[in-house]
Amino acid sequence: MKKHTIVALLQDRPGVLSRVIGLIRRRGYNIESLAVGHSETPGVSRLTIVVESEHVEQVVKQLYRLIEVLKVSDVTDDPTVEREMTMIKLHAPPAARHEIISMCSVFGARIVDVGSNTMIIEMTGTPGKVENFIEVVRPYGIKEMMRTGRIAMVRGARGHNAGEYVEPATNGVAVPALN
Amino acid sequence: MTKPLTGAQIMCEALIREGVEVMFGIPGGAIMPFYYAMWDYRDRLRHVLCRHEQGAGHAAEGYARATGRLGVCIGTSGPGATNLVTPIADAMMDSTPLLAITGQVGSHVLGKDAFQETDITGITMPITKHNYLVKNVDELPYVFKEAIHIATTGRPGPVLIDITKDAMQKTTVPNWDIKLNLPGYKPTYQGNRRQIREAIKLLISAKKPLIIAGHGIIMAGAHRELQEFAERLRIPVITTLHGIGAIPENHPLAIGMPGMHGWVHVNRAIQECDVLFNIGGRFDDRVTGKASTFAPNARIIHVDIDPSEIGKNVRVDVPIVGDARLVLQALLEDLPPPSELAELHTHASDWMEHIREMQDKHQGKQQYKNRAAMANMSLPPHDVYEALSRTLNARGNYRVVTDVGQHQMWAAQLIDWNQGPRTHITSGGAGTMGFAVPAALGVAIAYPNETVWAIVGDGGFQMTNQEMATIMQEGLKNIKVAVINNGYLGMVRQWQELFEHKRYSGTPLSGPNFAKLAEAYGWKGITVERSEDVQSAIDEAHATDGPVLIDFRVEREVNVFPMVPQNKSIGEMILSESQA
């Protein structure tokens, strides 16, 4: 099954993430990665989700049925910039440090914490590059790891600006934030 | 308005502002503040106390389906709310504008397993069009406005508002002037003009066109436009289960119901047609059979207000997103003048003649009513429907609510549906047994001057028959219930007979004496065991100034035919037991 990267703009209301995920769960699709956070427009969250699915068009249409979903697109075949970040707590006794540091510089990874026998390494890159880096450092002994999940942005003028979907506060009365 | 109101008073005011007149519900701890406030509004907001929240939900659905207006049901927190889950799911499947109002425990104990606490917004997320948890009294005016807007516009559906007890008790000066802010919700009503012209081109070039009229026609009030459009192009019209009433069945272009228990000539016509124009139907699997074999020769035009329905079950050549009525109006505007349609009309009469020939050969109604196998039966169910159809159509002014199962399919097949839209109401998508009696209660409240018949099996009847008490308490004299009592969960038994070696696990069903049960509720109860008594019982029901139940003890093992086995092509129909 093909992996699809879906980008969605959501109104920032309680439960909206749960609605989106529930819709994907209902079809029995596995979510490979999910990243959500603020967009450039206040009140609008932006989500990148990677799912394995054969009928992603239908999922996109059904996501539009959710009241708080502003825009959804499958950007799998679009020219995009994709990034993922990982933090790895690596077993790093003094004898191995030099080698690890040079490995990090090859990958453009940063060492953000050094303990007596461990290092925390922060690395950002395409999901493939992150994958490679993990394999390279795995032999030293990974004690902890966290990946943020993929975020994606379409190149060029086309894309997902949220401003066009949200009207500024109307007739001087602020819409109450729900909950 | 500067007077501070309690949250509960704001709820009442908000409902009145949105035109709500009737609510169906049951009080309980968390929702009590709403009932406290309701007392002051009792002359404007009628509250109907049901006997089970499921009944309240279906009653609200019946009200909504019969009127096109919002149905409102109320339950308290916990079990009160979870009992509403089935009608909410039913309303979701059948696109019914329903507002469910539930009380929730106080916000200070929310999420702490308080008494009668259930996460009803979490539970109903996949079965509502939208839902809300309100903890702040200031949000109530806006939330009610937005919720009702969402429930009643676009593709209608159920919306639930869960309100904490303290939000109902606190006071505030309500702000009614907040504009709706729904950037993610903009239903498309006008069909794309280019696609509309494309549809006309296809229909005009067709030699064997067909129209499928679905629930969307009824909901959009597009039945007149549909008939005019079909007449102008002389295209035969199929009505789905929920499309019944879109065109009277005695109209020369009406050919009947498709699908699993549709007519042979209808299903064969679908398999033969070259252009299939579906307006407001969603190609449900009970209509299409095995979808990959459905209408193999047809270019398909699909009009639906919900873009996610288009291309979901069958491939579509011309998709049109829009309101059925507005799209039909646009289609009518763009039609060429009659002088240019002469050739089309020639094809049309050949095609119609062919369909009618198939119909004569396999004819639905008469053939299945008069089968030899029924000659020895003291009460074949078909006799009940024949008498009901004759009597109801002679009297007029009726609505019929059916439940789910064999009796429902017989009603769809055997009654001549000539009364127009919203006169046949049933649970289609969800197939909710127990729907009919409470839904009939809602219909009877909406139309007190019409006779409302609930046709229900003995299985479904026993799921919600407690609402007979509600009907009595509300003084609804216009409800008549026909129990098609065969002592089985009949449709399941039919499948067991035809496909599962007659292993009748869990389907034989006994019940009380239904007529005596009705008498116990203060109704009139009549038992009918022979065909010759059917007509007099129906006449007696009509003559009685009060609710009446007729227990029709029909032949036990009669099957609904024709039938397309599940996941088979609609070209492969079983016409009788001997073919199964």
Image (spheres, rainbow, N blue to C red):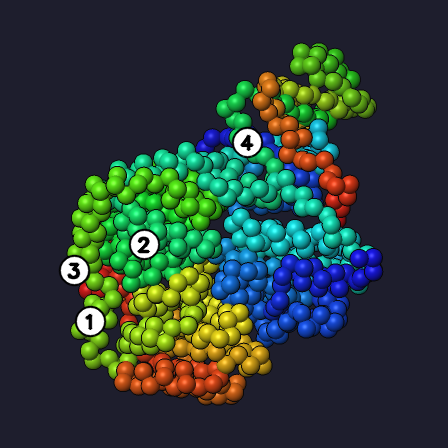
Place of residue B206 in the rendered image (x, y in percent of width and height, measured from the top left): 25, 40
Place of residue B32 in the rendered image (x, y in percent of width and height, measured from the top left): 73, 69
The residue singled out by tag 4 in the image is A73
The residue singled out by tag 2 in the image is B238
Q: Is residue A8 visible?
A: yes
Residue drawn at x 45%, y 55% is B221
10 Å crowding of disc 4: few (<14), some (14-19), many (20+):
some
The residue singled out by tag 1 in the image is B371
Query: Type of residue at label 4?
Result: Ser
Quadrant position of the C terminus of chain B in the picture: bottom left
Question: B450 or A102, which lies in front?
Answer: B450
Question: B289 or B453, which lies in front?
Answer: B453
Image position of B394 with respect to B164: above or below = below
Query: Type of residue at label 1?
Result: Arg
Please name which of the two marks, 2 or 1, marks the residue nearer to the observer: 2
Q: Are marks 1 and 3 on the same chain?
A: yes
| Element marked by disc 2 | strand
Q: Quadrant of residue B456?
A: bottom left
Residue drawn at x 80%, y 62% is B5
The label shown at residue B361 is: 3
Question: CB atoms at circles 2 and 1 under 8 Å apart?
Answer: no
Q: CA distance from mark 2 to mark 4?
A: 36 Å
Query: Type of residue at label 3?
Result: Lys
Place of residue B458 in the rendered image (x, y in percent of width and height, measured from the top left): 41, 75
Question: CB atoms at circles 4 and 3 under 8 Å apart?
Answer: no
Q: Chain of mark 4?
A: A
Mark 2 and mark 3 lie on one chain; the one further toward the N terminus is 2
Q: CA distance from mark 1 to mark 3?
A: 14 Å
Question: B294 or B148, which lies in front?
Answer: B148
Mark 2 and mark 1 lie on one chain; the one further toward the N terminus is 2
Q: CA distance from mark 2 to mark 3?
A: 18 Å
Please name which of the two marks, 2 or 4, marks the residue nearer to the observer: 2
